[in-house]
Amino acid sequence: MVIGPEWLRATDAEGRQRLDDPGDHVTAEVRSALASAKPVVPVLVGGASLPSEGDLPDDLRSMVRRQAIELNDQTWADDVEMQILRLEGKEAAIARVGFISSLDPSEASLMLETDGPLSIEVTPGV
């Protein structure tokens, strides 16, 4: 579920808060996912943060106890890549990607170890 800065205050055409509308299809999907055994990961975009439990209807409150991920506008591509690696179960690769991203390319020398195929794209000057 993607949560932006105005997610809590989103309203329908009549000005009703969407989270309080049982007929709102997006809210219904969130409710259904939270009630199921399926994994639900709040994705925070645009500088949003997780709402507090008190700001949510009872059946959505479990959302705030889940591990959220943040996708930042300035580091969007790296953030998405790291989340893909995490979803694929490649936790060790996440640490390497974070380390690589923190290096100054003009001063770095790098050696990578991997258990399988590795593809790296290098763009000089970026």
Image (cartoon, rainbow, N blue to C red):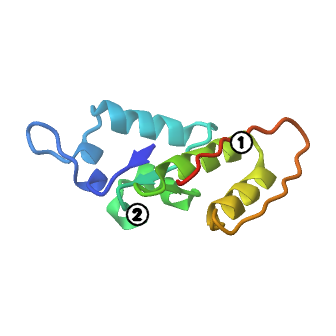
Crowding around mark 2 (Cα neighbors within 10 Å: few <14, some 14 to 19, many 20+) is: some
Q: Nearer the viewer, residue 35 or 118?
A: 118
Crowding around mark 1 (Cα neighbors within 10 Å: few <14, some 14 to 19, many 20+) is: few
The x and y percentages for residue 67 are: 59, 58
Residue 69 tag number: none
Q: Secondary structure at mark 2?
A: loop
Question: Which part of the image, by quadrant, shows the N terminus?
Answer: top left
The x and y percentages for residue 48 are: 37, 60
Residue 111 visible in the picture:
yes
Residue 36 lies, with reference to residue 59, above or below; the image says above
x 54%, y 56%: residue: 68
The x and y percentages for residue 109 are: 77, 63
x 76%, y 44%: residue: 89
- Total number of numbered labels? 2
Disc 1 target residue? 120
The x and y percentages for residue 71 are: 47, 53
Q: Secondary structure at mark 1?
A: loop
Q: Nearer the viewer, residue 45 or 68?
A: 45
Query: Which of the marked residues, 1 or 2, is nearer the chain's N terminus?
Result: 2
Kind of residue sitting beneath label 1: Ile
Q: Nearer the viewer, residue 99 or 126?
A: 126
Q: Answer whether labels 1 and 2 touch (C-beta < 8 Å).
A: no
Instruction: Name the image quarter holding residue 87.
Output: top right
Disc 2 target residue? 49
Q: CA distance from mark 1 to mark 2?
A: 32 Å
Residue 42 relative to residue 106: left or right: left
x 80%, y 39%: residue: 118
